[in-house]
């Protein structure tokens, strides 16, 4: 097939190449300087010789062309097999063929290396856990990773950054980096679909990428960090306020006792009683703060002790019975006889139930009953298809005024009070339920709160049974 194609191409080339000689011979014959027969013989010889030379060159060049076509085919693996590569031509065309082969191999290696680097870069961009956006010199978004697409939506074609992030601080930072600034960091708020605090970090790219990107933008969700900072600030402010109030009271009474009431024994006794009450309040606050700090310090370490709930709750009821009696209240225990032991720290669990029962005494109606009921059963894991887990549940029910639904999610926050004045009057520090939450976190347990205004509240604690204890089937006893 190569020979046939070469013949078709060689004929016109041979005629063109031999035309000058044939014209000279014809002129010599026409002028009588050369006989016609020798002229014809010489012309035929010139034509045949030229055809042979041109045909050989055309055949060699045709093979070189076909080889180049093979080497540049998409299937490069097949292109390098002897079955697909034409035989090397001889002569100068062969040298050209070898040069083309070497050039093709070099470029193929470079292409494969570039493709590997590009694939690695794409894999790195896709694996970055934070949203990542590439910008070109016109501030257009030319590439986003999956995390950015999930946060901001898919980007179809190059679009201005303002089309997906309309925050003026972010756009100003982008313009500054695109003008030549090395990096810029700004914090901003993203309000949809839910409000989040984000940090945008812009940086220039030293070399322009294949998609013309010259700057990279990464977004970091700092919502939890901002909330933690706000909680810390609120905690310091609340703790300072809680301590300042009794200290101010103590200072005022001390000045009064040293001055106008120095000789007034009746006022002195009354003021000393108030001072004692305020000092006790500060002591409770400091003890709760220290307790909360100690619990948080060890919150990551789950206790491995074995605690018998029956004796613990019985001792607690006996201890608080006197306080309950002062308000005409009674503590009623409703425990199943086969209640298993739980995994935990006895002192910390005693603090949990003491805080819950103490709250029931403070906020329950005078003359009412506080019920402490314990049972075994399963608590839904709330993890989708995850199976239910075996737990021991202890519910503390009071018959108080109840709590409005909007307050329930915040009850375990530090210093959060539904009725601040009443809580302080009752001697509360605002840390009791926060301590309960952190103790249960350490025990890998849970707290659920239900309340109906005008009827009362139920605080249910879920604890894990000790591995050595065999939990009984779900039984009664829960209110």
Image (cartoon, grey):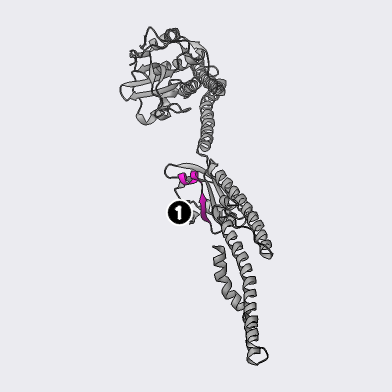
Magenta extent: 139-151
**Side of 366 where 57 appears, left or right:** right
**Side of 454 where 323 appears, left or right:** right
User: Camera-side residue: 344 or 251?
Assistant: 344
Residue at mark 1: 156
Rendering coords of residue 72 (x, y %) = 57, 57
Vertical placement of 238 versus 326: above or below?
below
Image quadrant in which you'd find residue 90? bottom right
Q: Kindly give the residue lying farthest to the bottom in the view shown.
A: 31
Secondary structure found at label 1? loop
Magenta-colored stretch includes residue 415: no
User: Camera-side residue: 158 or 189?
Assistant: 158
Vertical placement of 418 versus 133: above or below?
above
Quarter of the picture containing the C terminus is: top left
Quarter of the picture containing the N terminus is: bottom right
User: Camera-side residue: 225 or 260?
Assistant: 225
Rendering coords of residue 415 (x, y %) = 47, 27
Residue found 49% across the figure and 43% down from its top: 147
Q: Categorize mark 1 by other alpha carbons within 10 Å: few (<14), some (14-19), many (20+).
A: few
Q: Is residue 235 visible?
A: yes
Magenta-colored stretch includes residue 146: yes
Rendering coords of residue 89 (x, y %) = 65, 61
Q: Kindly give the residue lying farthest to the front in the view shown.
A: 37
């Amino acid at each position: 097939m190569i020979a046939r194609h070469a013949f078709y191409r060689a004929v016109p080339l041979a005629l063109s190449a031999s035309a000058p000689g044939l014209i000279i011979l014809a002129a010599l014959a026409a002028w009588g300087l050369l006989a016609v027969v020798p002229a014809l013989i010489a012309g035929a010889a010139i034509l045949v010789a030229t055809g042979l030379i041109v045909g050989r060159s055309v055949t060699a060049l045709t093979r070189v062309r076909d080889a180049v076509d093979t080497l540049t085919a998409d299937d490069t693996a097949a292109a390098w097999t002897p079955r697909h590569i034409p035989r090397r031509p001889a002569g100068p065309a062969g040298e050209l063929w070898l040069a083309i082969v070497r050039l093709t191999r070099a470029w193929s290696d470079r292409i494969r290396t570039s493709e590997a680097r590009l694939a690695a870069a794409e894999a790195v961009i896709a694996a970055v856990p934070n949203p990542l956006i590439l910008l070109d010199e016109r501030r257009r978004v030319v590439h986003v990773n999956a995390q950015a697409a999930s946060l901001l939506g898919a980007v179809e074609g190059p679009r201005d950054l303002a089309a997906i992030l309309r925050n003026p601080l972010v756009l100003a930072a982008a313009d500054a980096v695109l003008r030549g600034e090395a990096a810029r960091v700004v914090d901003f708020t993203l309000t949809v679909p839910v409000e989040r605090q984000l940090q945008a970090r812009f940086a220039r790219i030293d070399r322009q990428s294949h998609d013309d990107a010259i700057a990279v933008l990464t977004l970091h969700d700092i919502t939890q960090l901002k909330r933690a900072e706000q909680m810390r600030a609120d905690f310091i402010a609340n703790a300072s306020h809680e301590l300042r109030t009794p200290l101010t009271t103590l200072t005022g009474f001390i000045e009064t006792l040293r001055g106008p009431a120095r000789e007034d024994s009746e006022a002195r006794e009354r003021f000393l009683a108030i001072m004692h009450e305020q000092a006790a309040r500060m002591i409770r606050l400091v003890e709760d703060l220290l307790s909360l700090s100690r619990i948080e310090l060890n919150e990551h370490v789950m206790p491995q002790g074995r605690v018998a709930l029956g004796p613990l709750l019985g001792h607690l009821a006996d201890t608080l019975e006197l306080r309950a009696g002062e308000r005409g209240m009674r503590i009623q225990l409703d425990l199943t006889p086969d209640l298993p032991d739980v995994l935990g720290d006895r002192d910390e669990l005693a603090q949990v139930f003491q805080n819950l029962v103490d709250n029931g005494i403070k906020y329950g109606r005078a003359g009412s009953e506080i019920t402490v009921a314990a049972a075994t059963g399963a608590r839904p894991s709330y993890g989708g298809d995850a199976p239910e887990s075996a737990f021991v549940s202890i519910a503390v029910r009071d018959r108080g005024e109840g709590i409005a639904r909007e307050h329930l999610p915040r009850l375990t926050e530090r210093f959060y009070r539904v009725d601040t004045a009443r809580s302080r009057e009752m001697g509360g520090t605002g840390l009791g339920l926060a301590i309960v939450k952190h103790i249960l976190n350490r025990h890998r347990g849970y707290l659920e709160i239900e309340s109906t205004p005008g009827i009362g509240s139920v605080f249910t604690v879920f604890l894990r049974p000790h591995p050595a204890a065999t939990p009984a089937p779900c039984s009664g006893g829960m209110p």
